[in-house]
Image (tube, coloured by chain):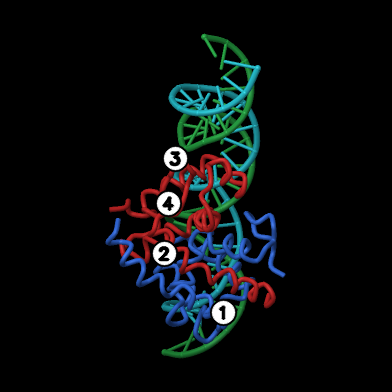
Chain colours: A blue, B red, C green, D cyan
Amino acid sequence: MVKRARGSRTGRPIMVLLDLLGRRWTLRIVWELREEPRRFRELQEAIGASPTIINTRLAELRQARLVRLDEEAGYRLTSLGEELLRLFLPLHVWSEKWAKAI
Amino acid sequence: MVKRARGSRTGRPIMVLLDLLGRRWTLRIVWELREEPRRFRELQEAIGASPTIINTRLAELRQARLVRLDEEAGYRLTSLGEELLRLFLPLHVWSEKWAKAI
DNA sequence: CAAGATCGCTACAGAAATTGTAGTAACGGA
DNA sequence: TCCGTTACTACAATTTCTGTAGCGATCTTG
């Protein structure tokens, strides 16, 4: 079982998930892994956050079984992670529409 | 146009959106507004965060035209906000599956 | 009219999270 | 041996968030 998330007092899965995804850089990391595996330093450079926090978030994502480290290729989404990503992919198209509206 | 988001250096809509949604409590606030409008203090109590940060996030969400204040009823999603929420609703079901897997 | 309740919201000090920079240990190849 | 690459850690400075208290406006109740 995953560690009780910091903002989630109920333990209900949706709350745990929203808490995990609502931490800074978490969504962004998942997004960066959408197409191909990335090395730690590639992620760091692409995202522009400190290695400390990248590593912390990767650890959380690994514990949540959404990301794993493939020593050959780098960090990559697990099958669970890919399922989650598929739910998020429509955001890409929608964000364009949203950007025009604001 | 929305203020350049803190973690988004590119300005690409998807990055701006991911940055906005990736701030602590933002996703959770949208989630709490999924069914009906909520008063400021209702939100605060339901979420369990400080009024300072609730207010900051609400201001960001209002600026992004995802949330608005209806003086009669409280904070509610705009039509854009409802579109965004519809993209997120499958998370609820998926989170149950995910919780079983970890 | 006065007192109380409720509304959104702000002030502020202490605590926690994040940054930015530097560096470590392990491994592989020249 | 030396160099490059890997993931990752240490740590002080900075930024963000919390927890509590309270403000000013508005509405209701006595």
Amino acid tagged 4? Val
- Describe the element under mark 1 as helix, strand or loop: strand
D19 up-or-down from B26: above or below: above
Q: Is residue A69 left or right of residue A37?
A: right
Foreground pick, B84 / A65? B84
Q: Would residue B24 be visible to someone looking at this image? A: no
Foreground label between 4 and 1: 4
* Chain under disc 1: A
* Chain under disc 3: B
Q: Residue A100 sits in which quadrant?
A: bottom left
Foreground label between 3 and 1: 3
Q: Residue A79 sits in which quadrant?
A: bottom right
Residue at figure coordinates x 46%, y 69% from the top left: B87
Residues at marks 4 and 2, CA–CA distance in whole angstroms: 12 Å
Residue under pointer 1: A69
The reply to the same-chain question for discs 3 and 4 is yes
- Describe the element under mark 2 as helix, strand or loop: helix
